[in-house]
Image: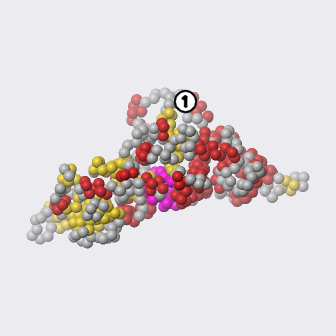
Amino acid sequence: MENVSRLCIARLTDIQESKMTATLVVGEGGFPFIDVDHRQLAVGEIGSHVLIRQGDIQVVAQVVRARQELLPTPAGSSAGKSDGVIKRGLLELLPLGDLSKNGVFSRGVVHHPTPGAEVHLMRKLEVESLFKKFQAKGYELGYLPTLPSVGICLDPATLFARHLAILGQSGSGKSWGVASILQRAVNTMPNAHIILLDLHGEYAWQDHNGAQHAAFRENTYRYVDARDLEIPYWLLTYGELVDLLIDRSDEKSSTQMAFLREVLLQLRKKANENLEGVHITIDSPVYFDLNELFMAFKRANEQVTDFGKVKGPLFGQFDEFIVKLQARFNDVRYDFLFKPKRRKSSDTLADLLRDFVGLRKPSRQITVIDFSSVPFDVRPTVSAQIGRLTFEFNYWNPRSREFPILLVCEEAHSYIPRFADTQYEGTRRSMERIAKEGRKYGVGLAVVSQRPYELSETVLAQCGNFICLRITNPDDQEYIRGLVPDAEAGLVNVLSSLGRGEAMAMGEALPIPTRFMLHPPNPTPNSNDIDFYGQWKRGAEDLDVYAIVDAWRRQKK
């Protein structure tokens, strides 16, 4: 057994509610290595855990800053003297919780120590006790860099039910981390139901020979091209149609929106008269004829009376709307939305829902929906539509508590923006509704972003868990600092120093905020950086440009 007094490295000199400062009593002002459990520990390593002892009080804290002060040497003193100064090592500590005498950790500090309390390095047995709480569930995402034998287990029930934000700048290992988190979810929980919105084809893709690859094992996922999934125009709500077809900055937009509301309700009712006992509203998920909508606008826009002498009340009000809709009709890229081949009636909705929640036989835990071939300007609308259908599915599902669904939104900042964007206002509202109400109906949300500052504050504020990889942008760091609990805000400073694949996890799904290494995914996503050096040195010297042009025209990779 370790000599406890030998592990004392500092004493508290300043105590605040969420921060403590300690002065080193080892190393003569430096930061030495000390042998603990036959391993060398660096005193003051950022992210390491220490134990503050004073009488019956045992408080676990994390090192968030280590610094050295240079003080003038007192007259007649030679201790620690170097060029007339004395070096003093200081540690800034974030208190995390209490550790009982029998080794049980509880979050939050009940009894704060006072100045003079001893700060000790933690033995392996004490560190392991911090992470015992969720080990029985077996959902291990990584390990401590300073103690690789200690696995970091999270509570999957809380991680996914209370919503999750996975944040990190480009190149930090974000896609790598998402793949690892989902792989371990389906391995641990074979009846998982996960929908992954893959905006760039990173999690399922074809190589140049046409072979299929994925970041998941073959029997765990289903790949769906968003265009082949055929989420038709008639499933769009009124708000989503406004986002897609009307420019809100147009001075005639209010007239266009009012007329759209009137005509849309009429067409939905007309096409579904045979649905007995169903109250059709403007947002009902029922078929209507888009061509009839177009013709209604065209007739009103061209209406004249009295043998062409008097213009109708809406004459010329819809010029821009008609041009925009006609352009979309004629663009082959939008055929999957405006010209469905299979979803031509209200009866096809059940088959669509079965397809994307993973119930089509053979059933799969993960449905990867590839958006890489979908035009940029409609990606937000289609993404929000999938999110809304997921929410509505479980909202009306009487067994929703037995069938929880996780919606994973890659590059979420691009369609759930923080700042008001009139083009995507309806889209943002759909996703924010999931964030605020989804937990009640078994719909969890995992937002993945490289620019948290641009992501909806409403969505992030509803996230009870954060897995943050390297983030160096000051605006992003400050934004995250404002979202996490005050007691954990100091840990945000660590984000700029994280290595690739290393994360800081904070929230309700783990016993304490923890810096850890994620287990590598197997297989890996298609997210590696392009090797400019290697390809420019030995890469292709010629290309089939005609094939590139043909793929561009056909909109097929």
In-front residue for pair 248/349 = 349
Question: Which residue reaches farthest right?
Answer: 307
In-front residue for pair 134/342 = 134
Look at mark 1 in the image and give the residue it sits on. Answer: 545
**Residue 344, quarter of picture:** top right
Against 177, residue 89 (above or below) is below
Residue 500 on image: x %, y %:
36, 46
Disc 1 element: helix
Question: Which residue reaches farthest bottom?
Answer: 114
Viewed as shown, does residue 427 lie left or right of 188? right
Residue at image position (22%, 53%) is 41
Residue 465 on image: x %, y %:
43, 57
The quadrant of the rendering that contains the C terminus is top right
In-front residue for pair 548/268 = 268
Q: Amino acid at mark 1?
A: Val
Magenta-drawn stretch contains 551:
no
Residue at image position (55%, 56%) is 441
Question: In this view of the protein, can residue 468 be seen by the observer?
Answer: no
Residue 412 on image: x %, y %:
51, 51
Magenta-drawn stretch contains 449:
yes
Q: Which residues are magenta?
A: 444-466
Residue 69 on image: x %, y %:
23, 64
Residue at image position (32%, 61%) is 105
Viewed as shown, does residue 110 lie left or right of 364? left
Residue at image position (47%, 57%) is 162
